[in-house]
Amino acid sequence: MESRTLRTGAVRGHPALADIVEGIRKYPVWSALAWQDIRQRYRRSLLGPLWITLTMIVTIAGMGPLYAALLKFDARDFIPYLALGLIAWGLISNLLLEGCATFTGSDNMIRSVRLPMSMYVYQMVYRNVIIFFHNIIAFVPFAIYLDIPPRWLWLLALPGVLMVVVAAVPVAMILGIFCARFRDMQQIVASVVQLSFFLTPILWKPELLGSRIFIANYNPLYLLIEVVRAPIYGYVPGAKVYLGVAGITVVLYALAIPLLARYRQRIAFWV
Amino acid sequence: MALIRLENCNLDLPIYGLGNRSLKQMVMATATGGKIASDSRKITVVNALRNINLRIESGDRVGLIGHNGAGKSSLLRVLAGVFEPTAGRLYVEGSVTSLIDVSLGMDHEATGYDNILLRGLILGLTRKEIKRITPDVEAFSELGDFLAMPVRTYSSGMVLRLAFSIVTCVSPDILLMDEWLSVGDADFVKKAENRLMQMVSKASILVIASHNAAVIEKLCNVRVKLEHGRIVDVTRG
């Protein structure tokens, strides 16, 4: 049976696209909620969100020298590589893991007010971008210690972050919908993310693969890390990397839009 | 002008047990021909609303009556846009505010002022409008200096006072309520009732679900009786 709903003030057109646009218009709501999420996490702590930075500094300081020694890399070159890799991975893995709870984490709101579903996606993504910019500060002490001067090239990482964000939106829609419907999906995603950490060149360099470098080149997570990591580490990511990321993004939207159109109305039943 | 039109609206609510929420079990059910985990494929569906036809116009004060589980709250949620009807047409003209969950979105670690902002934004107000209503909330809630303190330090009555003071600041075209509010101590109840009456009188349409016959009698000019998800009786006047 067909069902139709018309409301004044609602965006007309394709249901998923209308939802996406309506969500963007709700910017004041989701940006405030995202900040609120962060404040809530660190409310009664002394350092506040700087805990995020501190944790990252400790991780890098611990793992950097160890893995440089294990893999027989020059520590001066490897530590910045690892630091940036971990920071970029932090953004991507958090987006994946928290993407699962996009809708289930906001069940109260979904069940009591009519707001576009994409709004919860933007809230989650925005929250993690804020966390990323806390994390990136962790690179500063290492840059100072290793005497790495800032370069204009670093700014190229910003469009990289934007690319990750644009790709994260459809991922969170897909994961959010699946994890709302199937509650064990979240565990599956968590295991896959954990495994991907070792399969993706973060602790190691893709050159080590030798003739099997395709393992890295066809890893979408590697491409997404590269657009953020490479400019600060010191080189421009190749055209192949950017094209790869663009390709992944197109595919993700092609999957997410029909999925959102079909299940958008059912999310309220599932959460 | 506010208007609500429901044409042949149905609402089927799926009820999920543990089995059919699991992807593993769904896959197992396919792999084993559905024998071992045969239950996991069947999803129980509650027909929360059946064939609802209703036209609510400006000036209508609609009271929804019926037993528990008759579909009153489901109908409110459909009107609020939380649930979309699984079949039929729904047409809503005018801004809608639902008081279904008054203390929605209260962050207990945040201060009263933070909560005014958050709740205001969720209600669709702009930051400017929220600034404008803040003195009103301060005055009405009588929370004074407590507003600068985290909500977790409030008593439950105070939390409700704050929530109530915020949500009643907006003036929607269509107001949806689940039960008449009961807030705090006797003094505040009187005050709250007056304020709610004001809000109701400003709204073009009120839809309230209540078990309290006196409330319906006092507020409503249209009574809609629901039974098992169907409208069995509509009385006007």
Image (cartoon, grey):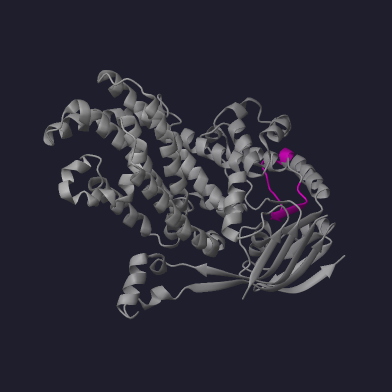
Q: Which residues are magenta?
A: B172-188
Left/right of residue A221 with respect to residue A63 in the rendered view: right
Say which of B225 and A224 sits in front. Answer: A224
Total numbered circles: 0
Q: Look at the image and say whether residue A186 sits in the magenta stretch.
A: no
Position in image of residue A87 (x %, y %): 33, 35
Say which of A13 and A86 sits in front. Answer: A13
Q: Look at the image and say whether residue B176 sits in the magenta stretch.
A: yes
Q: Quadrant of the N terminus of chain B?
A: bottom right
Q: Is residue A269 visible?
A: no
Q: Residue furthest front?
A: A239
Position in image of residue A78 (x %, y %): 21, 31
Say which of B76 and B67 sits in front. Answer: B76
Position in image of residue A207 (x %, y %): 19, 42
Position in image of residue A133 (x %, y %): 42, 31
- Name the residue at 52% across, 69% down: B14
Left/right of residue B212 with respect to residue B39 in the rendered view: right
- Name the residue at 42% across, 38% down: A161
Res. A154 image quadrant: top left
Q: Does residue B70 sit above or below A127 in this rendering?
A: below
Q: Does residue B128 sit above or below A257 in this rendering?
A: above
Q: Does residue B179 sit above or below B86 in this rendering?
A: above
Q: Is residue A8 visible?
A: yes
Q: Quadrant of the C terminus of chain B?
A: bottom right
Say which of A245 and A88 sits in front. Answer: A245
Res. A69 image quadrant: top left
